[in-house]
């Protein structure tokens, strides 16, 4: 009992030192309220920007104070805390600062107020990027084998304390990116810890790069390397940094998603012509047809897909065009070994409607011009594919799948080339007949191209699901063809390329053409795998899409997927599996994320912790993402239920109040 009274007395003394009201005569018995929001002290640097991006991506509310703004609020006791209904309140559960002294000196009024606040309420602080010195619990780098330098390509190691603590979700090794031999991408200071410092990440040379410094009643997570929000090493470590900051209790949730859509199943895809640098059949490929053959999976390719899934524990989504398959069968003697094999193994895949014949469902295309344009009626208005024709393409394909026993969901759809949706520059609006046709066919989730429309939006009563295009082209079956087309797009005119990379300000040209014999494996695969892995690590459920041609001939997709999944599994413990959702669940997740972000931005979320009780209130109909430790229970009107599902050693859920309740109430483990 004396220990408890001593702790309360110390807390009360800390509150008074911070200038925060101590809740009257009963202060010694009052447990403070901690609001579930993070304070970000922003100096404009890339490290704070990266941590802010992480908070935003997982849905964790934060308030930013831009340190360089003349009109910014003063960070004093009144800004940091107050009293609510007689209870002391900490307005922030954690602080992200650019370094250990965000206000310049230890004796400045704002720095003193911040330190007193953190000590009084037990609030933690991340020093986003600093250097090794005694004031952060480290020796200088010229002492005891310390080191400073470029970390590009380094393989750093999580310490035993890190693996028992905030980085328990990792396997142990964290590689630093090395994307260019001519550019230094990461610089760091690795130094020997002093008293009060616990190291979580060590450099290959020894010495700590990341750890906790506990001193003067405060805890700081000290980071002594530079980073930005896009780098893989930051994305890998960011989860643990946030869990440390919030002590494992916060709004928002973070999962690693990966789904791959394989378009055009049953349909053949045209082949790139390496002599003409175009694809015969495309409107801009002069000279009409060509000697190149179309690319289509075989029965052996279908069998390999099943074997690959089973070996890797990953499920592909097959987006099928039944009518195109029926046309192919009619042209090839009435048999189709590919279709027979895929249907025999139908339970191994997820299946999705890609329309019956992959028809273009937007405006009627006038192909007499290059590029094509929308055909016009006599009065000058745009000619549109009709509602009946769109609905027919969707329904005919769905019904074929039902007859064949495919596990297809009528609510899911991706149209050929995402047609029907706006296509710039030729078709700047959706086909006005599309929304009605989607409703007629029962479609609720319509795939869109993330490179054109990265945000989910309504199309009538349906919602789009943006998909990432993978840089494994639809019109190639061999690595040499892939490298040849890649060279055409990404080399300058002087190097024999199209020069598109020179004309596009967002693109970068290769320094020279890739070797067509080795370029795919040595350059394109690592590049594309790294891009996909960044998406996986970004709490981003959007699916990626490729084409059936990528599973045919030299089966170009598998090296990319093997690299993504292999690199992922080398980083993460078994408690952090890849979350592989189908389109309807991805659409639901995107909708929840957007609704939550809006509620937070509108200031309509209230969440706080008092001891082991957590209360969350959100607008009616908005579910709240919440992360809490194992052992957390949700209070119902009568009794409790186990909260959430396990992921990365925590419990997470999109939570809603129980029956007859207006708020979510959680009971944390003691």
Image: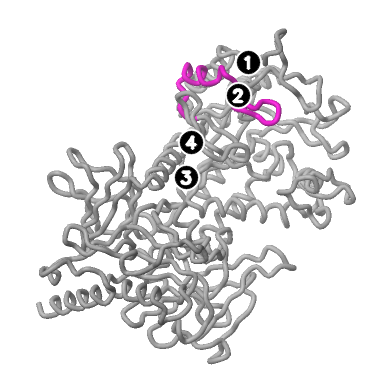
Q: Residue furthest front?
A: 71
Q: CA distance from mark 1 to mark 2?
A: 8 Å
User: What SS does tag 3 mark?
Assistant: loop
Q: Is residue 109 magenta?
A: no
Question: What residue is pinned by disc 4?
Answer: 583
Whether residues under marks 1 and 2 lie with C-beta atoms below 8 angstroms apart, the answer is: yes
Q: Which residue is mark 2?
A: 420
Task: Say which residue label 3 marks.
Answer: 580
Q: Locate the C terminus and report the quarter of the image it occupies.
A: bottom left
Residue at (47%, 19%) from the top-left corner?
Answer: 439
Q: Residues within 10 Å of mark 4 (few under 14, many from 20)?
A: many
| CA separation in Å, label 2 and label 3 | 27 Å
Q: CA distance from mark 3 to mark 4?
A: 10 Å
Label 4 SS? helix
Mark 1, residue position: 385
Q: Which mark is residue 484?
A: none
Point out the frontmost of discs 4 and 1. Answer: 1
Answer above or below: position of 78 versus 590.
below
The scheme the figure's colours follow is one colour
Task: Mark 3 vs mark 1: give the one in front.
Answer: 1
Of the two numbered discs 2 and 3 on the same chain, state the one appearing first in sequence.
2
Of the residues under marks 3 and 1, which one precedes in the sequence? 1
Marks 3/1: CA–CA distance: 34 Å
Give the residues drawn in magenta, as a range. 419-445
- Residue name at image x 49 percent, y 37 percent: 348
Q: Is residue 421 magenta?
A: yes
Identified at 70% across, 9% down, the residue is 379
User: In the rendered structure, are the residues bearing label 3 and label 4 in contact, judged by CB atoms less than 8 Å apart?
Assistant: no
| Residue name at image x 68 percent, y 63 percent | 179
């Amino acid at each position: 009992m004396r220990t408890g009274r001593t702790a309360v007395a110390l807390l009360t003394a800390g509150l008074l030192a911070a200038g925060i009201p101590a809740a009257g005569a009963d202060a010694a018995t009052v447990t403070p309220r901690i609001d579930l929001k993070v304070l970000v002290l922003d100096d404009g640097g890339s490290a704070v920007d990266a941590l802010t991006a992480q908070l935003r991506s997982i849905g964790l509310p934060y308030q930013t104070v831009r340190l360089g703004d003349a009109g910014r609020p003063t960070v004093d006791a009144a800004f940091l805390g107050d009293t609510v209904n007689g209870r002391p309140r900490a307005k922030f559960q954690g602080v992200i600062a650019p370094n250990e002294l965000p206000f310049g000196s230890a004796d400045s009024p704002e720095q003193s107020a911040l330190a007193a606040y953190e000590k009084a309420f037990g609030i933690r602080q991340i020093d986003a990027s600093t250097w090794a010195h005694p004031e952060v619990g480290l020796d200088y780098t010229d002492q005891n084998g310390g080191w400073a330098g470029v970390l590009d390509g380094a393989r750093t190691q999580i310490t035993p304390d890190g693996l028992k603590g905030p980085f328990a979700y990792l396997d142990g090794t964290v590689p630093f990116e090395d994307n260019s031999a001519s550019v230094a991408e990461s610089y760091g200071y690795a130094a020997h810890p002093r008293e009060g410092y616990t190291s979580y990440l060590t450099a290959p040379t020894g010495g700590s790069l990341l750890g906790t410094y506990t001193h003067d009643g405060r805890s700081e997570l000290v980071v002594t390397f530079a980073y930005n929000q896009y780098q893989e090493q930051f994305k890998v470590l960011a989860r643990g940094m946030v869990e440390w900051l919030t002590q494992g209790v916060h709004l928002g949730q973070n999962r690693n998603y990966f789904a791959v859509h394989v378009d055009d199943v049953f349909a053949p895809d045209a082949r790139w012509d390496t002599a003409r640098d175009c694809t015969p059949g495309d409107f801009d490929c002069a000279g009409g047809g060509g000697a190149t053959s179309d690319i289509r999976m075989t029965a052996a390719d279908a069998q390999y897909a099943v074997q690959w899934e089973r070996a890797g524990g990953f499920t592909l989504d097959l987006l099928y065009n039944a009518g195109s398959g029926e046309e192919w069968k009619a042209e090839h003697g009435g048999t189709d070994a590919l279709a027979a094999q895929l249907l025999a193994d139908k339970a191994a895949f997820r299946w999705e409607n890609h329309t019956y014949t992959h028809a273009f469902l937007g405006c009627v295309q006038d192909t007499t011009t290059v590029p094509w344009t929308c055909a016009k009626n006599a009065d000058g208005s745009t000619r549109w594919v009709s509602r009946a024709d769109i609905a027919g393409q969707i329904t005919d394909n769905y019904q074929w799948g039902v007859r064949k026993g495919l596990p297809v969901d009528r609510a899911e759809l991706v149209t050929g080339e995402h047609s029907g949706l706006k296509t710039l520059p030729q078709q700047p609006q959706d086909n006005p007949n599309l929304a009605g046709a989607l409703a007629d066919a029962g479609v609720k989730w319509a795939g869109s191209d993330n490179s054109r429309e990265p945000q989910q939006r309504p199309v009538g009563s349906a919602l789009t699901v943006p998909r990432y295009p993978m840089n494994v082209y639809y019109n190639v079956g061999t690595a040499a063809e892939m490298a040849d087309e890649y060279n055409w797009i990404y080399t300058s005119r002087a190097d024999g390329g199209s020069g598109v990379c020179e004309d596009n300000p967002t693109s970068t040209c290769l320094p020279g053409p890739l070797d067509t014999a080795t370029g795919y494996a040595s350059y394109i695969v690592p590049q594309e795998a790294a891009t996909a892995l960044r998406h996986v690590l970004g709490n981003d459920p959007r699916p990626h899409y490729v084409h059936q041609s990528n599973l045919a001939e030299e089966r170009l997709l598998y090296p990319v997927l093997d690299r993504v999944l292999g690199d992922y599994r080398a980083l993460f413990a078994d408690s952090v599996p890849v979350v592989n959702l189908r389109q309807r669940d991805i659409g639901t997740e995107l909708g929840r994320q957007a609704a939550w972000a809006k509620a937070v931005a509108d200031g309509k979320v209230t969440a706080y912790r008092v001891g082991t009780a957590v209360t969350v209130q959100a607008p009616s109909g908005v579910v709240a993402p919440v992360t809490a430790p194992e052992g957390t229970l949700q209070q119902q009107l009568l009794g409790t239920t186990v909260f959430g599902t396990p992921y990365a050693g925590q419990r997470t859920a999109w939570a809603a109040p129980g029956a007859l309740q207006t708020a979510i109430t959680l009971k944390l483990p003691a």
